[in-house]
Structures are given as C-alpha cells and as structure tokens.
Image (tube, coloured by chain):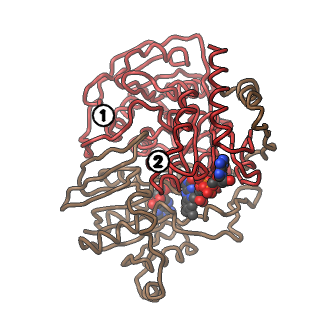
Chain colours: A brown, B red
Amino acid sequence: MKILVCISHVPDTTSKINFTDGDTKFDTNGVQFVINPNDEFGLTRAMWFKEKQGASVTVVNVGGAETEPTLRKALAIGADNAVRVNTEAKDGFQVAKELANVVKDGGYDLVIAGRESIDYNGGMVPGMLAELVGANFVTNCINLEIDGTNAKAVREIDGGKETVSTSLPLVIGGQKGLVEESDLRIPNMRGIMMARQKPLNVVEPVGAAVETASVKFEKPAPKGAVTLVSPDNLDELVSLLHNEAKVI
Amino acid sequence: MSVLVYTESENGSFKKTAFEVASYAKAVADQMGTTVTAVAINANDTSELGKYGVDKVLNISNDAFKNFNAKTYAAAIAQAAKKEEAKVVVVSQTADSKYLAPILAVSLEAGYASNVMEAPTSTSPFTVKRTAFTNKAFNVTTIDTEVKVVGVSNNSFGLVETSGSASSEDFSPSLPESGVSVESVDKATDKVTIADAEIVVSAGRGMKGPENWGMIEELADVLGAATACSKPVSDLGWRPHSEHVGQTGKPVASNLYIAIGISGAIQHLAGINASKVKVVINTDPEAPFFKAADYGVVGDAFEVVPQLIEKIKAFKAANA
Ligand SMILES: Cc1cc2nc3c(=O)[nH]c(=O)nc-3n(C[C@H](O)[C@H](O)[C@H](O)COP(=O)(O)OP(=O)(O)OC[C@H]3O[C@@H](n4cnc5c(N)ncnc54)[C@H](O)[C@@H]3O)c2cc1C
Ligand SMILES: Nc1ncnc2c1ncn2[C@@H]1O[C@H](COP(=O)(O)O)[C@@H](O)[C@H]1O
C-alpha cells in the first residue's frame, strides 16, 4: 500500500498572532512552526500501517523552503520520503489541486490528511482533493482499518460516532482518535540522523489558480473586563444573562 | 441567477441553522438584486422557510437521501445550483455541511470560504470576513470565481424574519455512486448535541470525578443545553470523547457557554472562543478563563452550581 500523508506547517497554538505590512501578512517573527496536530495523528497511524501491514509512507507539503524543517521532522518520525511542492499555499482549492497532481503522479492508494489545519481552519483541502482525484472521502475520522482494498472507518458525528465501510482509493480527514496522544512519537536522535539521508524531493507546482484571496487580517476588538458576580448573589447572574446578555 | 441555500433538516424538521443560512442568503440576494432558492432534503414543511426570506424551495423527497452522505448530498445541491444558475451557494457549518461543502465547491468549480462571520461587505469583488487562527483573528477574503460557495459560521449572522412566503417545487436530482456506506451509528438521541445547542454547559477537571456530573447534567437540562467537557476529562474517561471540546475536540459556537471548573487553557479557548457569551465558575480568581469570559463567579462549583440550578428553575417558572 502506498500512503501519502499531507502535512500542513502551522504556528504552534500558543503563538502570539500578529500581522505586518498593513495587516496583510502573518508575522512569523518568533513563531514556532509545527506539524498540524491533526496531521501528527495521521502520520502516526500511517506508521502503524507501515509496521503492521506493510506500506510505504510519503509526506507532502505545498509550501516554500521554510516548511522543510517540518517535513524533516515527519521523516525523523519515520516517513520514508518527502515531497515539497514549491509554491506558497494561498488557498484550499489551490493546495488541493497541487496535491491532486502529486497523488496522480505517485499512484497513492490512501491519502491521510487532517480534519482541518489550525491556521486557517479551512477544512477544505481533504474533501476537495478527494473529489479532484475521484477517491472516496471520510472526514472527522477517529479510526481506520484497511483490509486489501476495503476500508472500515469510524467517524465522529454530532453526539456520537458512526462506522462506515468504503474502499481504496481513499482520502481521510483525520483527527485525534486515529491514534491516541500517548502513541505520538517524538523523533529520537537516530531518527533525526536518518531523516537527513532520506529523499526530500522538491517538485514544481502545476500553477493552479488561486480562487480566493486574502485581503487583510483583523484582530477581534479587545474584550471588556469580566463582570464578576458574588456566589451569594446568583439571582444577579440570572438577571444579567436574561436582561443584558439576552441568552436565556 | 438566484442565491442558492442548502437548508439542513433532521428527521423532517429544519435545524435552526437552516433559518440562519436562509437569512444570510436573503441578505446576499438583496445586495445582488435577486431572489433566494433553497434546497431541502426530506423536510416535512418547507413553508417555514418563507419567513426567513426564501422565495422558492426545491424539495427533494427520496429515501435514497435518508442517511446523510456527503457525496450524494453535494451532488444534489450542485445540480440545484446549476438548474438555478446560482452564482452564490450558501451552506451552514454544521458537521454535515462542512463535510459536503468542499466536494460541492469542486463540482461547481467554485471558490469556497468557510467559517464566514458576516454578510459580504461587497459582492463585487465578493468580500467576506472569516475566522482564522483558531478564532484569534479574522481574515478578510475575496472569492474570485464566477460561482462562490459561502460557509456561514453557526450563530454568527442570526435569524432575520421577513414577511415573505416560499413556493415549493419537487426536485429529483440524479444520484452518483456514494462510495461510503454507513454500517452503524452510535449516538445518544435524547440529548441536545453540542453542534446544535444554543447553550453549552461544560465542565473540567475541577469537578474531581465522574460521579459529580449529576449537577452538570441537571444544569444543562434546566437550560435545554448540551453538555461538554475539557480534554483531560475525556482522556480520563470521565466523559465520552464526543463531549470533548477545544482545539483538538469539537468546535463550539453557541450563544452561551458556561465553563465550570475549567482553567481556560489556550487550547481549550481556541475551540470555544466563537461562542457569544461566556460564563466561568471557578474557585481560582487567577484562572485564565476569567480573562476570556463575560461573566464570572469566583466560587466552589459544588456550592454554586446547585444554587444556580434552583435560581434558573425559579426564573423559568416565573417566565413560563
Ligand atoms: C496540543 C494540545 C491540544 C490540546 N487540546 C485541548 C482541547 O481541545 N481541549 C481542552 O480542553 N484542552 C486541550 N488541551 C489541554 C489544555 O492545555 C489543558 O490542559 C486543559 O484544557 C485543562 O483542562 P481543565 O481546565 O479541565 O483542567 P485544569 O487545568 O486542571 O483546571 C481545573 C480548574 O478547575 C478549578 N477548580 C478546582 N476545583 C474547583 C471547584 N470545586 N469549583 C470550581 N472550580 C474548581 C481550578 O481552579 C482549575 O482552574 C490541549 C493541550 C495540548 C498540548
Ligand atoms: N499546504 C499544505 N500542504 C500539504 N497539506 C496541506 C496543506 N494545507 C492543508 N493540508 C492538509 O489538509 C488538511 C486540512 O487543511 P485545511 O483545509 O487547510 O483546514 C491539513 O490537516 C493537511 O493534512
């Protein structure tokens, strides 16, 4: 089985979010970039398939050279090789089209992406990619088993979960549950050394059109201070929620 | 040329988000000088949509749509959009609509903006404001394709009633091979779910153990709210994983979010910040949640929550 794991390179959640150039660009100054958490669960599940069932694992990112340390980290965790599509990621559709080209070229059976990335939270790429390559698609995936070309997946739904059956080729939007947090791997010294030798192929983009364009960023208006209510005066809380906030 | 809106229903009744996206579609249609057409799938009474600005309903009633399937639903909506020559297609951001929207966008060759917070500030170029960086910022985005898909964040635009009425027309789209079939569903059917809830009552490690959740459920009950929890609580097995909210759990965009014994870590807030009004109950006045909340009670949940339940019961009785 050939598995492709899509990795988005995102600011760590605890990063301060600031903008430059008249609020048109994300300020990367002092920001720590990580593998998107949802993708880390997916990568670890891919390693499980490799070790238990035999599979090759390729990681891919659409982005500039600055994302290579993130791909190297994925290699150090255990992926066999990496592909970077050399273009700035500007919108979900453009990224999905570039990834579709990689999927077609490489003949992957299973593509593991994340439910959403924590930077733009688009939740767009995996579904678009599936539709572009004509693969089946399961999102919010919390468990995945593959038997030949048959797949069984569990997905989180509102208020519970559902089990679905489908088949390869398949794209999933994964999240925690694919593996547990305790299964996540921290690259060790040997992994890091080996990652340096593993192939990281830079491919040129097909030049997919960008269909949405970021004009500028805004920060939410600063929040007013919290209104404290004494625990001995909860009638006031009820009254505030009813009369002021109008939520009950 | 009309604006098309997918109005989601469950067991024959429209979800509240259906009326919200209909209201949104009406606002867009007014800006563009056109009408609103809704697609409804197996809904019992489509006339309700008229109240929220829908002029015409394409009514699909077919058992093949009984279970939600992203691909077949997206195909039906895409066919409706083509039939109506819609340039703008509006969907909600429920789990189902988030699942189908990217597929829909590809089949319409449309640019898609998700998590949109407000009506477009301009329709040419089509400019919307969406959340980014786990609600820590907004991104103003243009959609530059001829056909556009807009995903409207739940509880962001609100409901706008009009005096119109909607005509209804049967619509029978052709169905693609679905590729994914549901084998079994494991879901509590008698409870309000987080995604649909207007009010969410959420509790954290401050509750000490699963045996103390009775009062959390009771508070949710009197408010008609859904229950949720912080990540450690589901990791410890005190509550089911489907209740875990935050960056790695479910997103919450309710009108009211009540956090009990939750410290307010950045990863927790990332998933619930889109909620309108936040109330925190915590013994520690230094808990970071107080900085993110609108109302706060510094106190012991074991004393505050039972009293709050009584006060709300009294309030409900007085206002019934
Ligand atoms: C990559 C990553 C992703 C994460 N994703 C999530 C996520 O999606 N969701 C999430 O929730 N967390 C997430 N976390 C964990 C997060 O950082 C916090 O550890 C977690 O939210 C803390 O949960 P808590 O507030 O329930 O517990 P604690 O931090 O232990 O807080 C308990 C609170 O209860 C209060 N308390 C104690 N007794 C009482 C009482 N009797 N009455 C009232 N208050 C009381 C305490 O003062 C304290 O503030 C993530 C962490 C990482 C690293
Ligand atoms: N630039 C990118 N390169 C590779 N994969 C990506 C990229 N952007 C998004 N993805 C994948 O798509 C998932 C969902 O991202 P998004 O649609 O941006 O929320 C991520 O978790 C990744 O698996």
Vertical comparison of B25 with B274: above or below: above
Q: In which quarter of the image is the C terminus of chain A?
A: top right
Secondary structure, mark 1, is loop
N-terminal label among 2 and 1: 1
Query: Residue B51's x, y, as percent?
Result: 54, 14
Query: Residue B175's x, y, as percent?
Result: 26, 34
Query: Residue A133's x, y, as percent?
Result: 33, 55
* Residue carrying label 2: B239
Residue pictured at 41% horizontal, 71% vertical: A59
Q: Are marks 2 and 1 in contact (CB under 8 Å)?
A: no
Tag of residue A130: none
Vertical comparison of B167 with B186: above or below: above
Query: Residue B203's x, y, as percent?
Result: 58, 45
As measured in the structure, the alpha-carbon distance from the residue carrying label 2 to the one carrying label 1 is 27 Å
Q: At label 2, which amino acid type do we have?
A: Arg
The label nearer to you, 2 versus 1, is 2
The reply to whether label 2 and label 1 mark residues of one chain is yes
* Residue carrying label 1: B67
Residue pictured at 33% horizontal, 36% vertical: B68
